[in-house]
Image (spheres, rainbow, N blue to C red):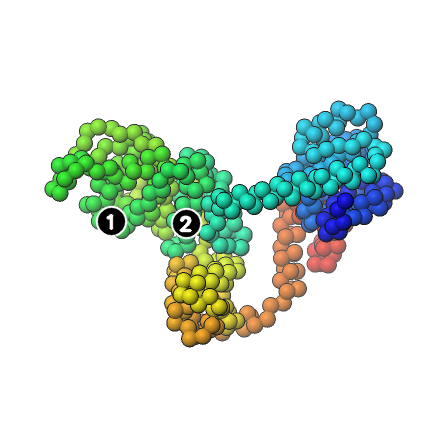
Amino acid sequence: MSTEKSRPLLIVEDDPALQKQLRWSFDQFETLTAGDRESALAQIHRHAPPVVTMDLGLPPDADSVSEGFRLLEQILSVAPETKVIVLTGQNDRANALRAIGLGAYDFFAKPFEPELLTLTIERAFRLFDLQQENRRLQELQHPPALAGLITRDAEMMRVCRTIEKIANSNATAMLLGESGTGKEVLARGVHESSQRKKERFVAINCAAIPDNLLESELFGYEKGAFTGAAKTTPGKIETAHCGTLFLDEIGDLPLSLQSKLLRFLQERVIERLGGRQEIPVDVRIVCATHQDLKSLIADGRFREDLFYRLAEIVINIPPLRARVGDPALLAHAFVRRFANEQNRSNMMLNEDAVRAIEAHRWPGNVRELENCIKRAVIMADGAQIGRDDIGLNVEQDDSNEFIDLRRVRDDAERQAVVTAVGRANGNVVRAAEILGVSRPTLYDLMHRLGLK
């Protein structure tokens, strides 16, 4: 029998006497308790317990099972891997089967034998651990498509989730962001997360190839199509058949080619230069640009109909300066990578260097930071990389010398509470549900923060 007090078990029971009995019966676990749906969801958000036991009859109508089933659905929605054991009354087989159908792990009829229920709980913990270990091993064998992208910024995390959502569709995706923000990394993430990942990912930079060569690069050419065309050569679009084509800097595509690309997007067939045969191509298009395409359309330099063909899904990538905490996080990762490459594995950034990195605006984004750290690793004399090694001309920012954690936390809590109450249109019960806290906790927060 397990004696791990660190394993949280959530007991959802509105009867104080039975709640106390359950806590006593399961004292080998770190028991958490909740008497209603709101407080149960708050415990789920706060502690993420692997196993939950819950009664279906919960207030405000303990004689009905509607509140219990609502809680069950919400638990499995926010934490689908949680093992929920439902406690039902005698002769309540219909509700027990309904709970299993919704995704509950098991059910027990009241009154129950604590020893048998404990065995079921321990089995649920073991199953949870096995599933977590299996997922970890699968990720080691098949690393996530975006495993190479390092971020803690909330907006960048939303970008990553969007990439994962759209991966298995065939919708054309447009990545908008400044140079060096990682557009190609995300484009590869779309490909690697999709069902096309076993086929080719073909990238072409529309700004890097002269206009007179770009058409043959994209669409290919037949033998003898022009001087020097010694053999038939497929273009990038054809080469990416069944895979993904990444059109980088699409804003620099010449107008003469925009109409031809538009026809391909509409018909999904191409004609090589010098050829007359239509060749069907199945390819997922991902494009990217740092330019404002709406301005280019207004200036007559980009076709509006092509824009709407390419912009089925638009993803805006934030610049590095807007990604809270990412500059220092990325800098430490780059130091580890380049130090290993240079056989200087004990190198690290000192505090002055980190403050300089956080204060810099990084107009070149991640690419600029990467080059800066690589140069510092090569040029630094000792194991410590200092402010002078980084070589950034930034003024000393006194605000970085001391961070008032309490003030930061209060500001964050205030913003979250105001947002939730506004989203709930002043309904405190709904606002508490959005925040994942109980109603009394929200009232305490509002009182402490001086909010009415």
Q: Quadrant of residue 17?
A: top right
Residue 404 at what x, y percent from top left? 63, 67
CA distance for labels 1 and 2 = 21 Å
Closer to us: 188 or 153: 188
For label 1, the residue is 209
Instruction: Specify whether 27 is left or right of 436.
Output: right
Image point 20% across, 45% down: which residue?
Answer: 213
Query: In the picture, which quadrant includes the N terminus?
Result: top right
Q: Quadrant of residue 412?
A: bottom right
Residue 391 at what x, y percent from top left? 41, 72
Instruction: Specify whether 82 is left or right of 181.
Output: right
**Which of pointers 1 and 2 lies earlier in the amino acid sequence?**
2
Q: Amino acid at mark 2?
A: Val
Q: Is residue 369 above or below residue 40?
A: below
The 10 Å Cα crowd at callout 2, few under 14, some 14 to 19, many 20 or more, is few
User: Residue lying farthest front?
Assistant: 1
For label 2, the residue is 185
Image point 41% across, 49% down: which residue?
Answer: 185
